[in-house]
Image (tube, helix red, strand yellow):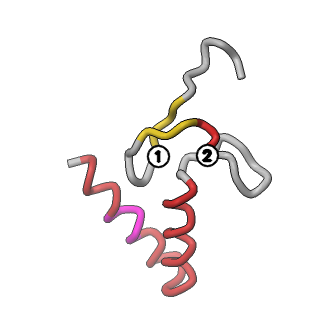
Amino acid sequence: MDAAEPKRKACSICGVSFHRSEFEYGNRSNRSYCRACNKAEREAYSLGGAEAARAFRDEQRLKWKV
């Protein structure tokens, strides 16, 4: 990691700032969702498909973007 690169990042779903390591999972780094939101979104997807996952993301974002 470059010295100029910030060590914290905000989740694009919940808006909470986490250490960058929270966004490195599933053999990929620099994701936009934190681990907890990724897990919750996958659960929503498994219960109701893409529409349910989209609704989950939109609902969570409304909580902190308003």
Query: In the image, what residue occupies the spot 53% across and 82% down?
Result: 49
* Location of residue 61 in the rendering, given as x and y in whole percent from the top left corner: 33, 55
State how far apart marks 2 and 1 are (Cα).
Answer: 8 Å
Q: Amino acid at mark 2?
A: Phe
Q: Farthest residue in the right direction?
A: 27
- The quadrant of the rendering that contains the N terminus is top right
Q: Nearer the viewer, residue 48 or 2?
A: 2
Q: Is residue 52 magenta?
A: no
Q: Secondary structure at mark 1?
A: loop
Query: In the image, what residue occupies the spot 44% across and 68% down?
Result: 54
Query: In the image, what residue occupies the spot 40% across and 69% down?
Result: 56
Magenta: predominant secondary structure element? Answer: helix
Q: Farthest residue in the top direction?
A: 4
**In the figure, is residue 22 to the left or right of 2?**
left
Query: Which mark is on residue 23?
Result: 2
Residue that numbered label 1 is attached to = 11
* Location of residue 30 in the rendering, given as x and y in whole percent from the top left corner: 65, 40
Q: Farthest residue in the left direction?
A: 66
Query: Which mark is on residue 39?
Result: none
* Location of residue 2 in the rendering, given as x and y in whole percent from the top left corner: 70, 17
Q: Is residue 22 above or below residue 4?
A: below
Q: Amino acid at mark 1?
A: Cys
Quadrant for residue 62, please give it: bottom left
Q: Secondary structure at mark 2?
A: helix
Magenta part of the chain: 55-59
Q: Is residue 3 above or below residue 46?
A: above
Q: Are marks 2 and 1 in contact (CB under 8 Å)?
A: yes
Q: Nearer the viewer, residue 31 or 3?
A: 3
